[in-house]
């Protein structure tokens, strides 16, 4: 199973539209995971129409229309992999401990908010992934998203994709 992980799209405030490379990657994904801060319902509608399966949450910049359609946290069983999604996990310092305590029943937690790519594993084996942002690199050198594979209930092949600069 092929996953596409994305967060903090911020359309139209940070970009007029999602990058073509990201949209093309959706076609090969069995599931798209969005960790919040969509900022518009048009992006949610687009990803719902393009995705085989969409798992998403709302973020701190998402208004009432998005909050009415998306939960604060989401969970999914993906071929035996216990996946969770949340927008905010708090400061980087202590993140592994806090997330392991808050989500003891998960194998993988996808989060956003910082726009900073993150890939760590807690002492008990919870994998924490932040795909960054495909539209707002903030202090990062590139806009980003992630892909990964699930096979036999295990996550593998995690790749951070750097997007070309917008013109």
Image (cartoon, rainbow, N blue to C red):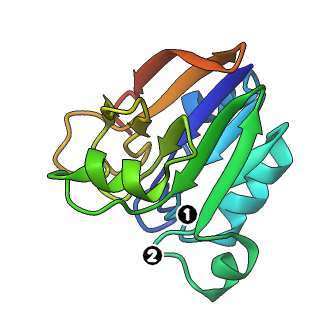
The disc at residue 129 is none
**Disc assigned to residue 61:** 2
Q: Is residue 19 among what the camera can see?
A: no
Number of residues whose C-alpha sits closer than 10 Å to that of mark 2, classed few (under 14), some (14–19) or many (20 or more)? some
Vertical relation: 84 (above or below) 152: below
**Which of 162/101 is in front?**
101
- Answer whether labels 1 and 2 touch (C-beta < 8 Å): no
Q: Is residue 159 left or right of residue 42?
A: left
Q: Position of residue 44 (x, y in %)?
A: 70, 60
Q: Is residue 74 above or below residue 40?
A: above
Q: Nearer the viewer, residue 133 or 87?
A: 87
Q: In the image, what residue occupies the spot 69% across and 69% down?
A: 70
Of the image marks 1 and 2, the number of the one nearer the N terminus: 1
Q: Secondary structure at mark 1?
A: loop
Image vertical order of residue 165 relative to residue 105, above or below? above
Mark 1 residue crowding within 10 angstroms, few (<14) / some (14–19) / many (20+): many
Quadrant of residue 25 within the rendered picture: top right
Which residue is depicted at the point 31% across and 36% down?
118
Spatial separation of the CA atoms under disc 1 and disc 2: 8 Å
Which residue bears the numbered disc 1?
38
Can I make out residue 36 in this image?
Answer: yes
Check disc 2 and report its element: helix, strand or loop: loop
> Residue at 56% of width from left, 83% of height from top?
63
Q: Going by the picture, which residue comes out furthest to the bottom? A: 64
**Is residue 35 left or right of 164 when viewed as pictured?**
right
Q: Quadrant of the N terminus?
A: top right
Which residue sits at x=40%, y=23%?
160
């Amino acid at each position: 199973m092929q996953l596409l992980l994305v967060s903090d799209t911020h359309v139209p405030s940070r970009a007029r539209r999602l990058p073509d490379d990201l949209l093309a990657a959706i076609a090969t994904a069995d599931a798209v995971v969005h960790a919040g801060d969509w900022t518009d319902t048009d992006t949610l509608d687009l990803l719902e129409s393009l995705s085989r399966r969409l798992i998403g949450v709302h973020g701190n910049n998402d208004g009432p229309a998005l909050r009415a359609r998306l939960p604060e946290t989401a969970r999914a069983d993906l071929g035996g992999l216990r996946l969770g999604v949340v927008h905010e996990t708090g400061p980087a310092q202590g993140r592994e401990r806090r997330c392991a305590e808050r989500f003891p029943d998960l194998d993988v937690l996808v989060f956003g908010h910082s726009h900073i790519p993150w890939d760590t594993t807690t002492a008990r084996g919870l994998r924490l992934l932040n795909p960054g942002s495909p539209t707002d690199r903030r202090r990062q050198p590139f806009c980003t998203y992630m892909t990964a594979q699930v096979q036999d209930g295990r996550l593998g092949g995690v790749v951070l994709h750097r997007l070309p600069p917008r013109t």
